[in-house]
Amino acid sequence: MAAHSEAQTTEMDPIKAYAEYRFDEDETYQQGLASILAGTALDPSATDEVRDEMIRKTRVFYFNKVKGYAVTLDEARACDLSLNPSEARTSGGPPSEDDENRVLTFAELKELIETGNVDKIPNNKIIPEGLNDAPPSQSTAPSRKKPWEKPIDQ
């Protein structure tokens, strides 16, 4: 019976590793996810459940590829449901206002521009369309002399 519990513990290690893996901090995963979500892989009108399932599939694929495990989608689903919902979800899309210091991927930046959400781009300055209404300043420096106005040095 001890061998059975030892096998069961070994079997749980990949699932525990999946549960503890920091997908939000893995830049390679985040860039891949952003490009998938920005592309045609997910319909913009998809429900949260469909979006969560797509993210879960990308996580399982990436985790198994990087770590060499064989975690199934059902195991990941059970693991994700046992987590706090705020930890289980990854936005994958444009950053929130709380996330202003994070560097955007090219795909995220492209998505924000295409959807017209340029106000959500961190450190983005909005430049007004019009010209400056103030009158131009007057020059106080003397104008340069033309070559024929200069005295000839001999």
Image (cartoon, rainbow, N blue to C red):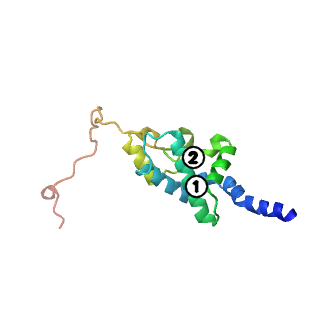
The label shown at residue 90 is: 2
Disc 1 element? helix
Q: Residues within 10 Å of mark 1 (few under 14, many from 20)?
A: some
| Quadrant of the drawing holding the C terminus | bottom left
Look at 74% across and 58% down and name the residue there.
Answer: 12
**Nearer the N terminus, badge 2 or badge 1?**
1
- Specify the quadrant that holds the N terminus: bottom right
**Residue 83 percent across, percent down from the top left:** 68, 45
SS state under label 2: loop
- Identify the amino acid type marked 2: Thr
Q: How many marks?
A: 2
Is the Cβ of the residue at disc 2 closer than 8 Å to that at disc 1? yes
Q: Viewer-proximal residue, 95 or 65?
A: 65
Q: Is residue 58 left or right of residue 11?
A: left
Q: Which residue is mark 1?
A: 59
Question: Residue 20, how many percent across, how many down?
Answer: 69, 54
Left or right position of 8 against 120: right
Name which residue lies at 49% across and 39% down.
47
